Amino acid sequence: YAADISVIDHAVGRIVDALARRGMLDSTWIVYTTDHGEMAGSHGLMSKCVLYEPAVRVPLIVRPPGGCATRVVDALVEQLDVPATVRAIAGAPDVAGSEGQSLLGTVTGGPAPHHDVTVSENWGFAVFETHRHKLIVDEDACAPCQLFDLAEDPAEDHDLVRDPLAADVVEEIMETHVRPFFATPPAR
């Protein structure tokens, strides 16, 4: 994992250096992200094909032309926001019906777009993550499988899905996010 990170860091550095040498760095937007994280041994797993935080929480770095003050934004962001941001940078109109929200205002110092929940899907399961909780659902059965309180348990060691004290949280996420999400047939 450390070798992977080193290789990526070196390659991005070469791209930035090439832009600087050509006098293009001050007129170039740089957007760095990836489609998945890696478990790297967390929960005893090495794969990416799970919905724990190390596998679904990915980097997103946006650097405008000329750079900007470093800013860390902890808001919920989805991969759908990346193409919306690139379209906004290019001055292109929004895609009709897209749920992606441009992060351009956030990059220039404004507030982050508001997402009540982010959704990730993998191998027949979906995760619905709010600002505090993470509910993993079997897509075919539309049934809750795991619930984590990320504020109290950021390592996701304590599954609360069967805890009677968490039943209201499970039902609220199911009612407000999961069932509406699956009410729309997938575009495949």
Image: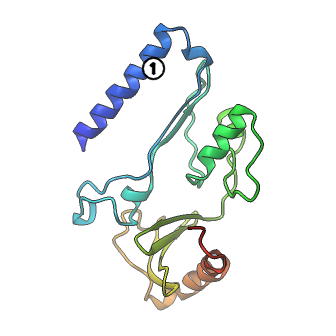
Locate the C terminus by quadrant: bottom right
175 relative to 154, above or below: below
Locate the N terminus by quadrant: top left
Residue 74 at x, y percent in the picture? 56, 49
Name the outermost residue toward the front. Answer: 188
Residue 7 at x, y percent in the picture? 28, 32
From this viewpoint, is residue 112 visible? yes
From this viewpoint, is residue 109 visible? no
Per the image, the residue denoted by label 1 is 16
Residue 10 at x, y percent in the picture? 32, 26
Please tell me which residue lies in front, 164 or 176.
176
In-image side of 16 versus 65 (left or right): left
Residue 179 at x, y percent in the picture? 63, 81
Please tell me which residue lies in front, 132 or 59.
59
Name the outermost residue toward the bottom. Answer: 164
Please tell me which residue lies in front, 94 or 101.
94
Mark 1 secondary-structure assignment: helix
In-image side of 11 versus 136 (left or right): left
Amino acid under disc 1: Val
Q: Residue at x 55, y 40 (%)?
A: 72
Q: Counting other residues with Cα less than 10 Å from the Cα at mark 1, is it few (<14), some (14-19), or many (20 or more)? A: some
In-image side of 31 versus 65 (left or right): left
Q: Residue at x 61, y 78 (%)?
A: 182
Which quadrant would residue 129 be assigned to in this image?
bottom right
In-image side of 177 versus 151 (left or right): right
